[in-house]
Amino acid sequence: KSSSGLSYNGIENLSCSKRYLFLSNHRDILLDSAILQIILFANKHEPSEITFGDNLMISEFIVDIGKSNKMFKLIRGGTPKQIFINSMHSSKYMRYTINKKLQSIWIAQRNGRTKNGNDQTQQAVLKMFGMSGGHDFTQNFAELNIVPIVISYEYDPGDFLKTRETYITRRQPYVKAQGEDLNSIITGIKQFKGMIHLAFTP
């Protein structure tokens, strides 16, 4: 009821027998990965596991949603040593999941939802992918079967919330209010999005 329709392209280039690391832009906390699962299921692909930042585990309700949708936690923040250890742990798990568990994975290409329209992939995300490989740079990445995907909403359901945060951030440090992430999740689900399109790119 909150969308005019869903379209997608490029899935014909994927094999049902292969597992992929879907590297995606990020517009909505929950919907981006959920829409991918719908498309995969409709085309007889296994649904993917989904990365979920520990900052979003804000209530038992959200944790339960995550567990029922094969989400796994990415730990953010900490000292440089802790960040390195957590990144290595995540990298090893993702490589194991794709090559041994034979499950695909969805991950956003940067921390947080894009608020300024700049969808460049963060270098830290790419470095994390390669950390766990035992081969050269090219082979380490080839093993992960990386498929960039792009999702777009005709109307961003969180536009007002993102605009407010961006406006405040330009003037002072932004501190999230209690329950703000939960409100963003509910807003993303309920507010009108118009047409939605997802593209699987080479």
Image (cartoon, helix red, strand yellow):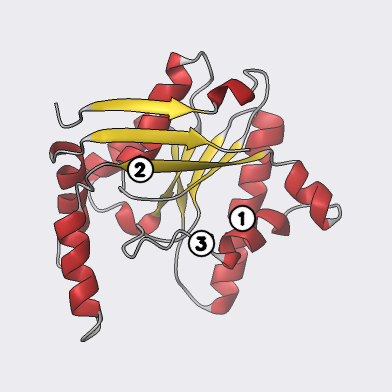
At mark 1, the secondary structure is helix
Label 2 environment density (alpha carbons within 10 Å; few <14, some 14–19, many ≥20): some
Q: Nearer the viewer, residue 181 or 37?
A: 37
The part of the image, by quadrant, that contains residue 166 is bottom left
Please tell me which residue is depicted at 36% across the width and 31% down the height of the picture: 35
Q: Which residue position is annotated with label 1?
A: 89
Q: Can residue 176 be seen in this view?
A: no
Is residue 184 rendered to the left or right of residue 130?
Answer: left
| Amino acid type of the residue tagged 2 in the rendering | Ser
Determine the CA span between mark 2 and mark 1: 31 Å
Q: Where is residue 117 in the image (x, y as percent from the top left)?
A: 36, 60
Amino acid at dot 3:
Gln
Q: How crowded is mark 1: few (under 14 residues within 10 Å), some or many (20 or more)?
A: some
**Rendered image: mark on residue 152:** 2
Picture quarter containing residue 10? top right
**Residue visible at 31% across and 34% down in the picture:** 196
User: In the structure shown, which secondary structural element does the residue marked by tag 2 occupy?
Assistant: strand
Circles 2, 1 touching at the beta carbon (< 8 Å) = no
Given the image, on which type of amino acid does mark 1 rest? His
x 58%, y 53%: residue: 90
Label of residue 123 in the image: none
Which residue is denoted by mark 3 in the rendering? 120
Q: Is residue 165 left or right of residue 113?
A: left
Q: In this view, does 81 lie above or below 96?
A: below
Mark 1 and mark 3 lie on one chain; the one further toward the N terminus is 1
